[in-house]
Image (cartoon, rainbow, N blue to C red):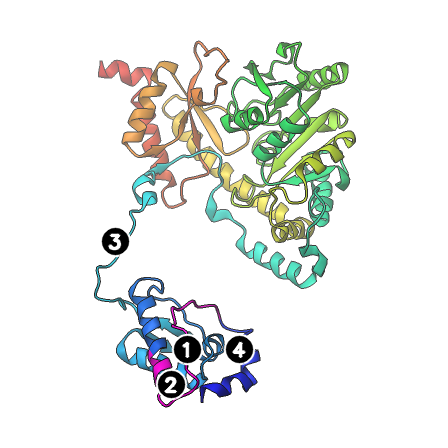
């Protein structure tokens, strides 16, 4: 009976359907003596029991349709169907109309069950999560993403899924060129854009191929950005920040490049003044240097006039970089470099076709969201959501006499504290289950510590909607223990 499977027309169909299942079936060396079918049926049943017993097929695992498995293991469909029925009767499997055949709950051999691995996420999950660098995950535009996915998958040509140009997807570069020009004032065309996975990767790419031996950076900034630059063999030199942004006159003479966050300095939140914007472009042209503009939080502005990009003042000397990690999600690995024309080929071919890149499908989906207006709508909805959160946070602290900083845009605020209290607040915050950071964490190792500027940096986008008010109350209570008035009363 089993020999008929080779001529069964179903085999050709079944091999295209179902799913793979590896079983430890002994080889069949017989040529068809009496009892062969029973032996093969017994071997298949034992192989399935063993896979369930040792955990290779955990509870809930869906088995291939019996006709598909029959084609894969070279048995008749009736033989495999009988084995499935036998294991269902024994309680190893369950079969329901519409959901296929699955491993039954609790189906496991008599041996000791494997201990469930300890979940680090459970033990390390903050009670009050004010972690930085991430939007609220509940805002991910699921409906728009699904709609764009359907349109893209229906319309994309076959060659869209092959190796592409090192600059990245043409549809996304075209969409970005229009969006960045309209929404941020960037002066570019699609051929000047190189897509990457993150600003961090973009900085490392530039460090290896564009920067010289040294680059000036703001005295406070993201440590992993500095580390990415230094991995590319470029040293970083800090320049001070004041209420007008980075002090351009402090750029060292030997430096030919500078990295700035001009729209919303991280973490202080100040914007680079118009005079200093013009000054840094003049500096770059006079020195034959480059300015790298990280458009950090540029889209998430609240109660101030839009701050345009620095790149618009000097597209010949400014490299503009940004990503969707704050506007959509850091899980979506898409960022971009807008380059002066003379650097495009150098950067693109250094990146290479096979270098780390975002999924081409994600690039096409984001392009569709931009073209259809879904991305704009999502940003505007997010802006209002975070503005309400920002207002709630600042109002609660204002009631205690504390004015938070860096809150005209973005997803974080700096709560000013005595720099001598930063360490104690971090320790006590950790004990109470908080996640946040001290301002000193972001200071360049070679930058002198400020005399009177301490702070706790909190991400107000992170807490869940159901706990946000309680989280803010707990934060105010924690910081309040270190305010001068309360400290004096305690003493």
Name the front one of labels 4 and 2: 2
Q: Are marks 2 and 1 in contact (CB under 8 Å)?
A: yes
Give left or right: position of 125 versus 250: left
Name the front one of labels 4 and 1: 1
Residue located beneath label 4 in the image: 14
Quarter of the picture containing the N terminus is bottom left
Estimate the spatial distance between the alpha carbons at disc 2 and disc 1, rounded to whole Å.
Answer: 9 Å
Residue 430 placement (x, y as % from top left): 31, 30
Estimate the spatial distance between the alpha carbons at disc 1 and disc 3, rounded to whole Å.
Answer: 36 Å
Give left or right: position of 376 versus 420: right
Mark 4: few, some, or many residues within 10 Å (few <14, many ≥20)?
A: some
Q: Residue at x 70, y 55 (%)?
A: 160
On residue 36, which mark appears? Answer: 2
Residue located beneath label 3 in the image: 115
Q: Regarding mark 1 in the picture, which secondary structure is present there?
A: loop
- Seen in the picture, residue 233 relative to 370 is either above or below; the reply is above
Q: Regarding mark 3 in the picture, which secondary structure is present there?
A: loop
Q: State the extent of the magenta-drawn residues as a range.
A: 19-42
Residue located beneath label 1 in the image: 28
């Amino acid at each position: 009976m089993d020999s008929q499977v080779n001529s069964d027309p179903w085999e050709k169909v079944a091999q295209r359907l179902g799913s793979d299942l590896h079983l430890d079936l002994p080889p069949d060396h017989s040529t068809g003596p009496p009892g062969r079918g029973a032996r093969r049926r017994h071997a298949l049943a034992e192989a399935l029991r063993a896979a369930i017993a040792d955990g290779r097929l955990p509870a809930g695992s869906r088995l291939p349709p019996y006709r598909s498995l029959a084609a894969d293991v070279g048995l008749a469909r009736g033989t495999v169907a009988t084995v499935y029925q036998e294991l269902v009767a024994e309680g190893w499997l369950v079969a329901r109309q519409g959901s296929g055949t699955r491993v039954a709950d609790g189906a496991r051999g008599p041996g000791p069950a494997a201990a469930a691995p300890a979940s680090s996420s459970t033990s390390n999950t903050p009670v009050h999560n004010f972690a930085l660098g991430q939007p609220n995950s509940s805002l991910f535009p699921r409906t728009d993403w699904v709609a764009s996915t359907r349109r893209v998958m229906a319309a994309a040509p076959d060659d869209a899924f092959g190796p592409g140009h090192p600059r990245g997807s043409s549809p996304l570069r075209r969409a970005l060129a229009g969006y960045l020009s309209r929404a941020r004032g960037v002066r570019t065309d699609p051929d000047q854009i190189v897509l990457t996975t993150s600003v961090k990767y973009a900085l490392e790419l530039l460090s290896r191929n564009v920067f010289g031996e040294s680059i000036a950076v703001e005295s406070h900034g993201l440590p992993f950005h500095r580390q990415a630059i230094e991995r590319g063999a470029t040293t970083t030199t800090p320049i001070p920040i004041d209420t007008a942004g980075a002090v351009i006159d402090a750029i060292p003479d030997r430096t030919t490049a500078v990295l700035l966050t001009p729209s919303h300095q991280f973490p202080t939140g100040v914007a680079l003044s118009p005079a200093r914007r013009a000054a840094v472009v003049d500096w770059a042209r006079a020195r034959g240097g480059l300015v790298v503009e990280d458009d950090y939080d540029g889209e998430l502005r609240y109660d101030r006039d839009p701050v345009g990009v620095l790149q618009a003042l000097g597209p010949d000397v400014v490299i503009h970089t940004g990503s969707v990690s704050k506007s959509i999600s850091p899980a979506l690995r898409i960022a971009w470099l807008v380059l002066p024309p003379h650097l495009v080929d150098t950067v693109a071919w250094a990146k290479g076709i096979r270098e780390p890149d975002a999924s081409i499908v994600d690039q096409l989906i984001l392009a569709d969201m931009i073209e259809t207006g879904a991305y704009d709508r999502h940003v505007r909805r997010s802006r209002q959501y975070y503005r309400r959160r920002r207002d709630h946070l600042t109002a609660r602290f204002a009631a205690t006499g504390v004015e938070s900083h860096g809150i005209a845009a973005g997803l974080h605020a700096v709560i000013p504290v005595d720099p001598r209290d930063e360490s104690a607040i971090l320790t006590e915050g950790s004990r109470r289950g908080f996640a946040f950071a001290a301002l000193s964490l972001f200071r360049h190792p070679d930058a002198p510590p400020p005399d009177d500027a301490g702070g706790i940096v909190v991400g107000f986008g992170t807490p869940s909607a159901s706990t946000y008010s309680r989280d803010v109350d707990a934060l105010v209570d924690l910081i309040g223990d270190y305010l001068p008035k309360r400290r004096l009363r305690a003493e």
